[in-house]
Amino acid sequence: MGSIWSRSPIRTPQNQTAKQTAPRSSAHRLAELEKESRRTEAHMASLKKRQANLTMNADEMVRQVRERYEGLRLALDWDEQAVLERLEQEHRESSSRLTRVLQDWSQHLRVVRKHSGTITKLQEGAPMGQQQEVLIEDFSCHKKLNADDEAIRLNEERFQKLLKALGKLSKDLEAQLQRKILLLDSTEVVIDSITSHRQIKVTSGGRSMYVSPKECSGPHHPLQFDQVYCALGSAAITAGQHYWEASVHCCPAWAVGVAYSSLHRKGRDKSAKLGRNRLSWCLEFQDGHLSAWHNDRHVALSTRAGQGAPKKVGVFVNYPKGYVAFYDAEAMKVLQEFSGACSAMFERAHHQFTEPLFPAFRFFKPKDVRSVPDHMWICELSL
């Protein structure tokens, strides 16, 4: 009879590989997770260190700022104390002089009363109807007024000069503090010579421009202004806060502002003019009148008494907040603001900018031939 052989399962290479692969895959995955854990811990430690350094740096910045302001306060306190001490000294000297004069007149009054008493006694002691004639020379005590005594007073003229100087200093300091804040966001503006009108000559590395009687040579550009004398900055504003200034005192009529890149460049209709559309905002001076424009609406603005139009225009843009403001850059006075809380005069209050913004400038066509061409330039700003 034949024997029955028990047969063990055949271990194929595939089965062996499957059993060996599973442990290796788990080990590999575990190693990767441990590596990722170490990397994450190291990154978190780096972030915590940066956070600590950030706090240390902020504390140091606060300390230095407080130190600077304390220096300003000390200087003001010292000056105030010096001025008050001088006023007090003047008061003491004037009061002392008046005291001496008062004492002199008090002595004179005593003499007058003494003489008056003597004469009264003489009259009372004489027999009835036989009063003696008193010689004036015997009791003469008339005291003349001294003009110098009348001049003893606090120096009112000097005091008014002091108040005027302090008032001017206060305004100047306020303006400088405002300017300091704006200069922290100063932005370098360069005029784009390619897209500016062909009669606008850009010089000084893009920092200055003027209107030439002749067009510049070179090919026409599709984004070039062909009718309106406009020019834009070359760099777009798409985030953050920015401030720049333009000198306009050599230009009898001008507009300074900001515009979207979609501002029309061709033709002379409102779509290509600063402030006459929804794509631009500007401050404008023309025919002796200062005004602010947006969406073809404007508000008339007053100028400084005896000063006329501002000589330098400051432009501040807070892009995330949809805010633009125009300043008289010398007086640091806000001339006009555009924001989400914009006046109903401009119909629609925008809450944010929707396109990249560009600094924008416009010349108006001269009404007569000028020996010196109209020109503007971007001011160099430094703290």
Image: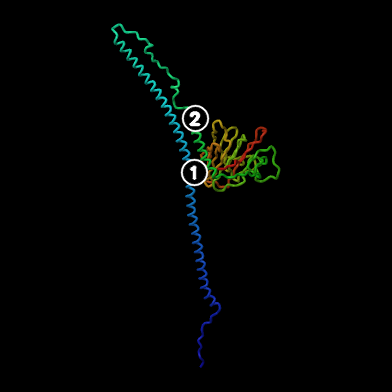
Q: Residues within 10 Å of mark 2 (few under 14, many from 20)?
A: few
- Amino acid type at circle 1 is Arg
Frontmost residue, 137 versus 99 = 137
Q: Can you say whether 289 is above or below 101 in the image?
A: below
Provide residue 344's location: percent of width, then percent of height: 51, 39
Q: Which residue is mark 2?
A: 161
Provide residue 176's location: percent of width, then percent of height: 52, 39
Frontmost residue, 279 versus 233 = 233
Q: Residue furthest bottom?
A: 1
Query: Answer yes or no: do the residues labelled 2 and 1 have beta carbons within 8 Å?
Result: no
Q: Residue furthest front?
A: 138
Frontmost residue, 344 versus 22 = 22
Residue at (53% x, 42% y) in the render: 180
- Amino acid type at circle 2 is Lys
Q: Residues within 10 Å of mark 1 (few under 14, many from 20)?
A: few
Looking at the rendered structure, the secondary structure element under dot 1 is: helix
Any mark on residue 101, and which?
none
Side (left or right) of 112 relative to 354 = left
Q: Which residue is mark 1?
A: 68
Query: Which mark is first along the chain, 1 or 2?
Result: 1
Looking at the rendered structure, the secondary structure element under dot 2 is: helix
